[in-house]
Image (cartoon, rainbow, N blue to C red):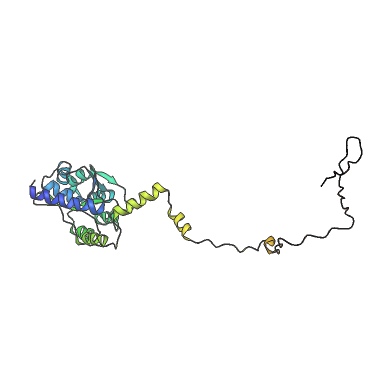
Amino acid sequence: MGLKRQKIAKKTISFYKYNFSFREPFQILFDGTFCQAALTNKIQIKEQMPKYLMGEVQLCTTSCALKELETLGKDLYGAKLILQRFQTRRCPHFKEPVPASECLLSMLGETNPHNYFVATQDRSLTDGLKKIPGVPLLYIILNTIVLDKPCQTSLDHVRAVQLGELVSPAQQQSIRSLKEVQGIDQKDGERRGKKRKRKQSNPNPLSCLKKKKKGGPTPPKTKTEKRKRVRNKKPRTEGGGVSAPAVTHA
């Protein structure tokens, strides 16, 4: 593996890690066209893919991709055997299978929330994936696995996030985790946002009474009240008589 190709792949992986929160193990969705190209060029996917991406990987496919290889006949029997060894991710077309290109596009949606890599040789599928931000594309060229450089849609998305026009997936995840830790629910936030109307209540009847004046004149006494007499007590002598007043001599 060339050092220059490894260096370019490392730079591209860092771009998706930093801007779209890609983490190991990297999930890679395969279709039959990539497996057929790997078989033709004698590429061992399970051995070479982790080395090229410099990390742990999970090789995945869908039931629609397997069904498509079955319908194409014996020419793609070897590719079918390779694809059967990968993990099968559940897609919404279990009862009515669709072409692999359509199925993989539906798995990614508009924002690739599960952070899938996509390995394909299908040009129409590649054109559709380049309209979705944050989708790393893998293909085979000249007997080697190549990780395509970020598409213009991904670059525009990152630029919009840096300018503050959008919220990055990493920021969205941190906001969700903070809400879970603090126990904040979206419905509770909406309820708190609405102002409660106060009910109109009648005034307190006690507050309507006139206040009594303080410091008013005291009411006059009635005739029936008896006045207490104050008697002056005269001092008595030891004999029981009244003591005479003392005479002073000039």
**192 relative to 75 in the view: left or right:** right
- Do we see residue 52 in this rendering? yes
Q: Is residue 71 visible?
A: no
| Image-based side of 176 in relation to 76, left or right | right
In which quadrant of the rendered view does residue 87 lie?
top left
Q: Nearer the viewer, residue 93 or 58?
A: 58
Q: Residue furthest top?
A: 238
Q: Which residue is depicted at the point 69% across and 60% down?
A: 206
Residue 99 in which image quadrant: bottom left
The residue located at (46%, 54%) in the rendering is 188
Rendered location of residue 96, percent (x, y)? 33, 53
Q: Position of residue 74 (x, y in %)?
A: 18, 48
Considering depth in this image, is 82 or 54 the residue closer to the camera? Answer: 54
**Residue 232 pos. (x, y %):** 86, 47
Identify the residue at the far front of this view. 250
Q: Quadrant of the N terminus?
A: top left
Task: Give coordinates of residue 5: x percent, y percent.
Answer: 10, 50
> Which of 157/232 is in front?
232
Compared across the picture, whether 231 is left or right of 111 comes to: right
